[in-house]
Amino acid sequence: MKLINWTALLCLGAVGFAQDVRFDYDRSANFSFYKTYQWVDYKEVPIGDQLLDRYIKRAVDEQLAGKGLRRVESGSNLIAGYQTAITQEKQFDGFSWGPALWGGWGDRRIATSTTDIGKLVIGLFDSVAKQLVWRGSASKALNISNDPNKNYMQLEKAMAKLFRSYPPGEGKR
């Protein structure tokens, strides 16, 4: 019984750290038409976020280049933009230390912690029609730790997972 409880606890911990990616797209868009893209900033990037801005754009650039798209400064088929949000998630961890004499579990303890969760939303717009044609989001894509290398690797992993769905209809590669 103790082994089952530890296994369940480990499985729940792994699920808690998994990235959640979602996407949607315009089913009437001809994605084979799109060959180039350029970035647009939805709003001015604060000085303190300039590194993060470059990291996000670099991670997305790598994925789009792998899909055969070329980044240009003007005259593109697609306009790419992103938004970020940091939310807090409360996590509850319960511990039990063996059966009590009266038939229940004894020494139950619950620990709580708060985790910052970074969400990244990428939008790809048709530059002529000025309409959204593809949107993807990744939760837990932006790690908030003191290790910048770990943070960037987490971002790259999330973008690779997210862009498996681009272009739509080609299935997972």
Image: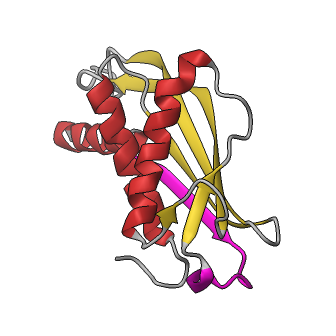
| Color style of the picture | secondary structure
Question: Hey, which quadrant is residue 132 in on the image?
Answer: bottom right
Q: Residue at x 63, y 32 (%)?
A: 85
Residue 95 vertical position relative to residue 6 in the rendered view, above or below: above
Is the C terminus in the top left, top right, bottom left or bottom right quadrant? bottom left
Image position, residue 99 (x, y; %):
26, 26
Residue 153 vertical position relative to residue 72 in the rendered view, above or below: above
Residue 147 vertical position relative to residue 82 in the rendered view, above or below: above
Please tell me whether residue 32 belongs to the stretch shown in magenta: yes
Please tell me whether residue 130 belongs to the stretch shown in magenta: no
Is the N terminus in the top left, top right, bottom left or bottom right quadrant? top left
- Residue 90 in view (yes/no): no
Q: Residue at x 51, y 71 (%)?
A: 166
Image position, residue 32 (x, y; %):
56, 85
How many numbered discs sit on the rendered protein?
0
Question: Hey, which quadrant is residue 105 in on the image?
Answer: top left
- Residue 153 in view (yes/no): yes
Could you tell whether 97 is left or right of 104 in the image?
left
Image position, residue 156 (x, y; %):
36, 47
Q: Which residues are magenta?
A: 18-33
Q: Residue at x 51, y 55 (%)?
A: 21
Could you tell whether 117 is left or right of 9 in the image?
right
Depth check: give the residue in front, 149 or 81.
Answer: 81
Q: Residue at x 46, y 17 (%)?
A: 113
Could you tell whether 28 is left or right of 14 in the image?
right
Residue 108 vertical position relative to residue 59 in the rendered view, above or below: above
Depth check: give the residue in front, 72 or 101.
Answer: 72
Image position, residue 74 (x, y; %):
65, 57
